[in-house]
Image: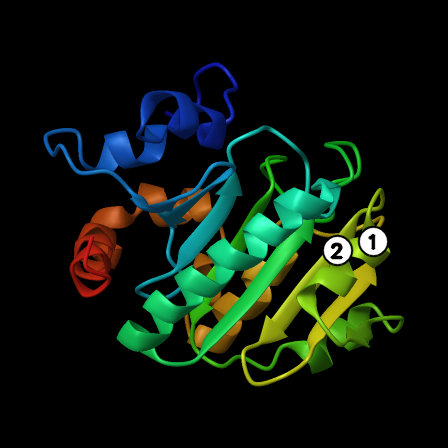
Amino acid sequence: MFDGPAECPFCALVSEGRSPVWDYLFRADSTDEIILRSASFLVILDTAPLAEGHLLIITKAHISSLAGLSTPERAELDSVKHHAESLLGEAYGPISFFEHGAEKFAKHAGACIDHAHLHLVPGDFDILPYVARDYPDVESFPSYERVLETFAGRPYLLFSRKSDQVYGVHAPACATQYLRRLVAQATGFRTMWSWRDCVRWADSLSVRDQLLNARMKLGR
């Protein structure tokens, strides 16, 4: 799976109904990772969860970041995000979210997959002090949409605790999966920030059980 031809796993999911990783984990199972659908977005279970219930909102179209959405698509995203947060909040409590906002693959802001996706992770994680240490220009914004408007056309990092403001910063240089690393540290999943390692060691990490438990708790 990791050594074959390069393929965008999210584009494969959109076209085939299951991602290559989900198919690898659940080859004999007819279920898939999709939790919600809309005209332009899918809400899916992250197959390398940093916590049980970890969701991704992905675009159906292959664009590099959510800041590249049109105004109507942003309104649709807001509705989808609210619905996903409601489901997740009822099942798991407080939520944190983040995005590595790529401008393009050459300027990927830590995104190892240049297909726009927003992480929604159960838990209230304060990663601001660590981001501010590495990116002193990080700013707070009154809304999620304002961050997207501000950084359209530029690589960026975006993150928030549900109970806090939304933060963003221009990130022309960034370590791969930078925000995943910080959230992994906050969850106590310190050494498993790499999604590839989570899939490779899925059995010892009980990843399949986490995914199936999350589907059940989310009523899907």
Residue pictured at 16% horizontal, 59% vertical: 216
Q: Is 195 on the left or on the right of 130, as rendered?
A: left
Helix, strand, or loop for circle 1? helix
Q: Is 33 on the left or on the right of 131, as rendered?
A: left
Q: Is 153 on the left or on the right of 158, as rendered?
A: right
Q: Position of residue 110 (x, y in %)?
A: 68, 48
Where's the N terminus, which quadrant?
Answer: top left
Q: Amino acid at mark 1?
A: Phe
Q: Locate residue 168: give its quadrant.
A: bottom right
Q: Residue furthest bottom?
A: 163
Residue pictured at 72% horizontal, 32% vertical: 105
Residue designated by label 1: 151
Judge whether 139 appears above or below 19 on screen.
below
Q: Position of residue 78 (x, y in %)?
A: 57, 58
Q: Is 23 on the left or on the right of 55, as rendered?
A: left
On the question of residue 73 being in view, the answer is: yes
Judge whether 28 appears above or below 127 on screen.
above
Q: Position of residue 128 (x, y in %)?
A: 69, 78
Helix, strand, or loop for circle 2? helix
Mark carried by residue 148: 2
The front one of 110 and 8 is 8
Measure the C-alpha gap from mark 2 to mark 1: 5 Å
The front one of 70 and 85 is 70
Local packing at callout 1 (Cα closer than 10 Å; few below 14, some 14-19, many 20+) is: many
